[in-house]
Amino acid sequence: MKFRITIERKPGLADPEGKATIRSLHDLGYTDVQHVSFGKAIVVDIDSTDETAALDEVDAMCQQLLANPVMESYRIERIG
Amino acid sequence: MKFRITIERKPGLADPEGKATIRSLHDLGYTDVQHVSFGKAIVVDIDSTDETAALDEVDAMCQQLLANPVMESYRIERIG
Amino acid sequence: MTTTSEIPAHIQLGMTDDEYAGVVEILGRTPRPAELAMYSVMWSEHCSYKSSRSHLGRFPSEAPWVVVGPGENAGVVDLGDGWLAALRIESHNHPSFVEPVEGAATGVGGILRDIFTMGARPVAVWDPIRFGPLDDAKNRYLFNGVVSGIAGYGNAVGVPTLGGEVEFAEAYAKNPLVNVMALGLLKKEQLVLSGASGVGNIAVLLGASTGRDGIGGASILASASFDEESGAKRPSVQVGDPFEEKKLIEACLELYDRGLVVAIQDLGAAGISCATSECAANGGMGMDVDLDAVPVREPGMTAGEILMSESQERMLAIVEPTNVDAVLAVADKWEIHGTRIGTVVEGGQLTIRYQGETVAELPAASLSEDAPRYNRPAQRPVSIDELHAATLPLPDSVDVATTLLTLLDDPAIADKSWIYRQYDHQLFLQTVIEPGHDASLMRIKGTTKGLAVSTDGDGYLCAMDPLRGGARIVYESALNVAVTGATPMCVVDNLNFGNPENPEVMWQLIESIEGISQACEALGIPVVGGNVSLYNQTDDVDIYPTPVVGVLGYTATLPDQPPRLDRGEAGMEVFLIGGPGGDDLAASAYARVILDARAGRPHDVDHDTGRAAIDLATRLAHAGVPVLHDISTGGVAVALAEICFASDVGATIDLATWQQAFSEEPHRLLAVVPVGFDWSEHLGGELQAIPLGVLGGNDLSFGTFGTVPLTAAHEIWKSAIPRRLGH
Amino acid sequence: MTIAVVVFPGTNCEHDAVHALTLLGADAELVWHRETDLDDFSGIVLPGGFAHGDYLRTGAIARFSPVMAAVTEAADTGKPVLGICNGFQILCEAGLLPGALIANRDLAFVCKPIHVRVESTDTILTSAATVGDVLRIPLNSYEGNYIAPPQDLAAIEANGQITLRYCDENGDVSDLANPNGSTNNIAGISNARGNVAAVMPHPERAAELILGSDDGRRLLEGFVAATKTSPQTNSVAAS
Ligand SMILES: Nc1ncnc2c1ncn2[C@@H]1O[C@H](COP(=O)(O)OP(=O)(O)O)[C@@H](O)[C@H]1O
Ligand SMILES: [Mg+2]
């Protein structure tokens, strides 16, 4: 079973990657870009047949390791 | 208009970050995890009312700046 | 139109019909596919040096302090008291053009393995790099990517990058040069070589698992010219993992410390096939290799793919059977793979099996020793004589001050801190003089000893005269290390040239080797290693002939206070040390940047003056002279400005002609000394110390040739690179 | 009275830390990250480097190394625990210090000497310094940009847990003197008790004049002194 975890910086906290990217985009002429935020997309493949259990497991991984609750929020979606 | 760009490493390329992460997940007891791969999730906000034009623009940004065509593939979806 | 399948396999792999016939003769039969792949890569230009080998013997390579000369993974020299230094230089030009970050990163990883293969701990890296002009977005992308690749890998692997150089010219736009030099330190008893001796010894593969990285990369990327379509035939990119390499370094050093390996070889171009055959051949042995044992990253890999894979961060250790368990335990401790993949056997046969089949069976030595050698025709270009006969269109009078501002804005002359600030250059608490000076100076902790290194090349100069250019870069590099108080000891060289099938390129190569050799002979410093990178050509345009040298200097006792650019103070006097003359402008930055003209024959070296200048610089450094700075790109004016910027003080100097401000004639340096410094006990022979002026004030003043405020000049120099990159 | 210098796979400043501590007369020893018992040590240093490659997030994987339970226990009993650079990042990930470290403002690694101003002295890192001291110390990091949620930030500011701020050579704390975008120019913090402290620049790289500065000694001396009065957790040390 495949899950995509999307991890985003919590709003209000600095996002140097987003800031640098929007600057470069403006320089390149994409001046109508108003905001860019950077996150991670982690795809996890689990050997499981029980979607609920697998989802719980992925959620536990996120809380324990994959995301940092101080600065990040995450979303999980099944993709395969 | 808001778009999410998901950028993934092309298959077959070494993924040191994925390797280190899966090792840590196994150590933590998530032994049924079979594969972890790392990508980026970038959210771009564009001041536009024409979805087709905006999509074209985001695609151009990906090709020009956001994704590295040698190592990465990308997907764009509208999220707002 | 021919389809791929009609083209014979050996041609597709880049072999000529004659080379193929040679393989058939060695084997006495048609090669199997894996065998053909092995020969094609091992006999490629990159691995076999087939076009350059016959000329490399010209380099002087002997001296009493040479422990290991050219031919092994790295050169090794003796520093006394049981200390050895290992050094090597490598290029990663084509991979860095395809993917700048990973190309440069894996270049660093590769050179480090060459160093710790010898038993040494890698302690420093330098990065001589070359790109097209920064006004082009693609060149900026490549430059940025290469620097972050070097930073990303070097910093994380935990080896400081202590300097390098950078040049920008259209000739490199479609073929950037990324060279990397590395230095390692070891105690005598830790030296390890690569020959597999001892029948029954076990070959253990250490490090990362094997994937389809850069299959055929060595031959395709390093030995073929590029054209606009090369995007399409991109082999998969090698991705560096500095974390894996760090663990591999520590594991290998522990193995050496505990005397657990007989021999070791890194896996570079052509991966397992190259490492097993070299290990066997160097020990005069054979080897049985079982590919099924190799840990793979992807399912379904063929024998050829496993054999040829250039996956990074792997080593092959030869271990006595009784030590295998201990070796595997060390691998386990450092969290890397350790796998038996072969056995050393009698006779010279390399046998490789996979999934119950013999996929290769050949004389191990034939892969390296029987490689073809070419004596390619060389031809002196007619145009070079016209060039030398021409004269530069020099104006009668020049405002030195405003001209200096234009030069300071040239990215090759400007402040390089945008680059080296991104590199950890302080790790190991050894860096006495950091990047930003002529050479970096390191202490060997726990001793009074010091080592200095400078890397130097000058494609623009060598294009105008490869013989004189070759000699001049050696002298410049040697003088750079001398101003830290070190005595030049040995050289490594990286020969970056165009297509060797072009006779004019062969001529450039031969001339450069001659020039480098003559200078090394005059200085008594051997060439202990090097690398040749040919086919640096895109769309039929060859790069400038670009030999790059790295000189290692040594001092048994570090100066109490080594000269530094920032030790100048108001009131101190500025002297020019050198011979007479000093106003020739051929191949100078003045000609390149201001006139945009190429004419005249670059000034030649003078071996007596060159030696004397180097010797004097070393002595002055130990005599406490606060600032010594060699005069190179941009001449006296730029050298003085660099001292003033670092020391944050102005200067007033007098020159007889404006040309003297910008001439780059060799063997000259600036010295800043306190008032009343007694030159008499230092000078002699052909060298003079010519008083130029004093430090002080807030301006750079050239008397009748003009004045500029120090801060304005400094700002231009500091911002030239970041401004072009949009920072 | 030995200080443990913890080595994770990927750590690279461990020998430098031992070297500098030894110069100050302390005993320091390397401890592999699989060690689970640190009772015999009088203080702990988590040195700089790239533990576990810094993959995922800097410090994220290291935080689960076996040794970290013992580090946490030592911190709870009041032993001096010092994180330098990567060690700072690990202590934040482990929750022993508030906040997190993210990529530098300019998205580039920064290696250069910078100045920091001492802001508080009630910690194991700054006890030998004086408030207002300006120290020149090398910075060397890609992720040196400190952030914290607003309430945490307010708390550490109010409690005097900011130990060092980036400043210019005159001690002025300004945007211009901020090398990496760190919030409020924060270069070092401690926990409320003051026994767990971390610093982004490298004091061990500024312990000898031949390397450019010995200002780092003023910090390390405080730490070494703290390890001498450190609470003892086993009978051997207590006797
Ligand atoms: N690519 C680079 N990487 C690291 N340091 C560099 C690089 N290019 C130049 N530098 C450093 O900048 C300083 C000036 O370099 P350069 O102008 O080439 O010196 P020189 O003219 O004396 O050879 C040197 O200390 C050098 O090591
Ligand atoms: Mg120089």
Image: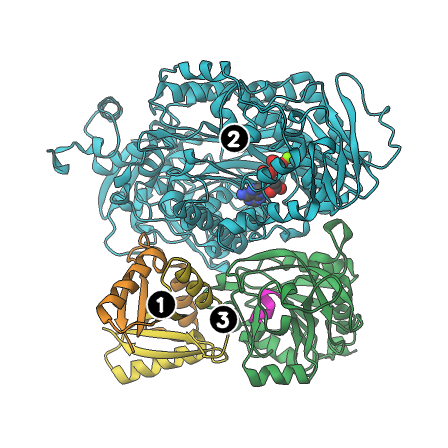
Chain colours: A yellow, B orange, C cyan, D green
Give the quarter of the figure containing the N terminus of chain C.
top left
Tell me which segment is drawn in magenta. D83-90
Q: Please report the residue visible at 36 percent of the width from the left and 21 percent of the height from the top.
A: C373
Find residue D203 and report its horizontal and vertical position in percent: 70, 62
Marks 3 and 2 sit apart, C-alpha to C-alpha, by 51 Å
Judge whether C185 appears above or below C397 on screen.
below
Q: Which residue is mark 3?
A: D60
Cα separation between marks 3 and 1: 36 Å
Q: Which residue is mark 1?
A: A32
Query: Residue flagged by tag 2: what amino acid is it?
Result: Arg
Q: Residues within 10 Å of mark 1 (few under 14, many from 20)?
A: some
Name which residue lies at 58% across and 42% down.
Answer: C414
Q: Amino acid at mark 3?
A: Ala
Magenta segment: does it hold D85?
Answer: yes
Question: Residue A25 versus residue C244: which sits nearer the camera?
Answer: A25
Crowdedness near tag 3: few (<14), some (14–19) or many (≥20) residues, C-alpha within 10 Å: many
Q: Tell me the subunit letter for badge 3.
A: D
Estimate the x, y position of residue C554 in percent, counting from the top left. 69, 34
